[in-house]
Amino acid sequence: MRPTLENQRVSIRRDNLRDALIYEIVELEWNMLCLMKNEQGQPMDQSGFDSFYAVRYSQHSAMNSDTIGLYKSDLNVAAHTDRNLMAEKYAYMKEPGSFAIDPELKPLIDQIVPLMLKSQESFAAKYPALAGAGRAFDTAEDSAPMDVYITSELITKTEPTLQMVLRDIKLNPDYIKDIFEVFVSFYGQESLDKAEVLTSSQQMKPCRGATL
């Protein structure tokens, strides 16, 4: 069982335009996820939005604002053309070997994935308990390898957006650390160091609550 950080309701962040933009993105993703689950005969529990929001906000927060804007455009275009980006993401995670990646996107994806993995390895070296307890790229029901999960996120983005993601990860080797730093803050943790100690101690005993 994954360790708990703190039993605390996630707060929706709308303090500025950037926060509002990320909220709109997460809402679009959530609607796509709900549609996908409904079509599979697995209705979503709306109470799950808070934890979904914390994970997705944290992930998107590592992007620069112009990258976030481009990704929101990707989502809007997809919604208006009946493309479900969350369904595509999960389809890739389920059977990556049988999924045809757009050849125009593949060169960019092939550059981004190793940089993301390097950032993850750097984070895990300093915060092994947090890295082992959960992944800011992941949700509780998924256990795809990190490279597969990262790729699943990238295949849903357009070439201009991927260009910006590549720029962001090149400029910020601590990309994954920044994601986790935001994530633990949702659960009342002031720093990664404190969250690491808490997570490490909780890995020694069963626990319940909000999970990382």
Image: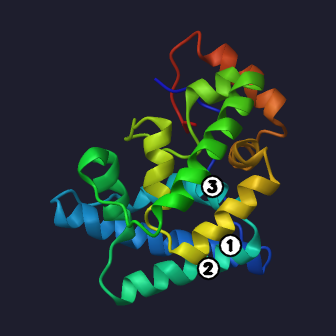
Distance between the alpha carbons at the discs numbered 1 and 3: 12 Å
Left or right side of 168 for 95: left
Is 37 positioned to the left or the right of 170 in the image?
left
| x and y percentages locating residue 80 in the rendered image | 37, 90
Query: What crowding class fits label 2: few (fewer than 14 Cα within 10 Å), some (14-19), or many (20 or more)?
Result: some
Which of the 4 image quadrants contains residue 44?
A: bottom left
Q: Please tell me whether mark 1 sits on a helix, a strand or a loop.
A: helix
Residue type for callout 2: Leu
Quadrant where the C terminus is found in the figure: top right
Q: Seen from this angle, which residue lies furthest top?
A: 204
95 shown above or below 57: above
CB under 8 Å between discs 2 and 1? yes
Which residue sits at x=39%, y=62%? 46
From this view, report whether residue 194 is shown above or below residue 166.
Answer: above
First in sequence: mark 1 vs mark 3: 3
Is residue 56 shown above or below 162? above
Task: Give the residue number, with chain letter if any, for mark 1.
Answer: 67
Determine the image quadrant of residue 12.
Answer: bottom right
